[in-house]
Amino acid sequence: MKHGKKYTDSAKAVDTAKLYDSAEALELVCSNAKAKFDETIEAHIRLGVDSRHADQQVRGAVVLPNGTGKNVRVIVFCKEDKYEAAKAAGADYVGGADLVEKITKENWMDFDVVIASPDMMGLVGRLGKVLGPRGLMPNPKAGTVTPDVAKAVTEAKAGKIEYRLDKTNIIHCPIGKASFGAEKLNENFTTLMEAVVKAKPAATKGAYFKSCTVTSTMGPGVAVATAKYGV
C-alpha cells in the first residue's frame, strides 16, 4: 500500500523497534496528526485470550474522563412512563414498536448507541439481524440494557465507550480527538486500560497483553509498553 508524503514523514518520527510509554506515544501521535480535520485517536489492544471460548470473552464499557469528542446520537427503547426521563437526559430518539418499524421498514440507522429497558428486549430482539452486525445490540455487560435508561443516556453522552474483542482477539477503541492533546488522551487511555485489566478472564493463560498500539485516523501506529499494567 502506497502512503502519502505526510504519512511517510510521520512514520520516520516513530521508532518501530521501541515500546513507548503511553504519554510519550500519545504526544507522538498528536504531533503526527496532520490531516485537515480533527483526527480520531484510537487504541488497538491485542490480548492473549481466545475469543472463541465463552470463558475468555472480554467485553464491557467505561466512561472516559474526557469524553470521546464525538456527538453521540442515542436511541432509547422503553415504556412510555420513562420517555420524559430519557429525553431529559439527552436521548435523541425515544420509543418502542414505532422505532422498531421505522428501522425495519425504512432501514433507518441515524443513531450511534442503542439503550433499552429490560422489559423491551423482547421487542428489540427483532432487530438482532440489523443491530448485531453493526455492534449496536443492547447488552447488560455494556450497561445498555438497564432499568435506569436516563442514567445510561447520560453516560453515553458523557463519553461512555464499549470495548469488546474482535475475531482476532483485538480490542479497537476510540479514546478521543487529536485536539484533546496528549495529557487528556493519556487519561482516557489509562482509564480504558484499567477497565480491560479488570475484565481479565480467570481462564487467561500466559501474558494478557500481547501488544498495544495507538494511532490517529491518518497517521502511523505507535507501540505502547504495557508492563506497568502488571498483566
Image (cartoon, rainbow, N blue to C red):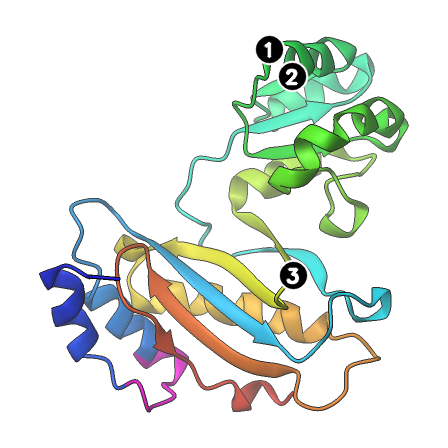
Residue under the image location 44 percent in, 49 percent down: 68
Spatial CA span between label 1 and label 3: 30 Å
Residue 23 higher or lower than 118, as above or below: below
Left or right relative to 37: residue 71: right
Coordinates of residue 3 in the picture (x, y in percent): 19, 61
Location of mark 2 (residue): 103
The residue under label 1 is 106
Location of the N terminus by quadrant is bottom left
Residue indicated by mark 3: 167
What secondary structure is marked by label 3? loop
Quarter of the figure with residue 5:
bottom left
**Discs 2, 1 touching: Cβ within 8 Å:** yes
Disc 3 packing (10 Å; few <14; some 14–19; many ≥20) = few
Q: Amino acid at mark 1?
A: Glu
Query: Residue 132's quadrant in the figure?
Result: top right
Q: Which residues are magenta?
A: 16-24
As for residue 18 lying within the magenta part, the answer is: yes
Instruction: Kindly report which numbered mark, 2 or 3, lies closer to the viewer in this rendering.
Output: 3
Where residue 18 appears, x then y in whole percent?
33, 90
Q: Earlier in the sequence, mark 1 or mark 3?
A: 1
- Dividing the picture into quadrants, the one containing residue 2 is bottom left
Q: Residues within 10 Å of mark 2 (few under 14, many from 20)?
A: some
Q: Is residue 107 left or right of residue 223?
A: right
Helix, strand or loop under label 2:
helix
Q: Residue 203: x percent and y percent?
A: 83, 80
Q: Residue at x 12, y 62 (%)?
A: 6
Mark 1 or mark 3, whichever is nearer to me: 3
Tell me the CA gap for discs 2 and 1. 6 Å
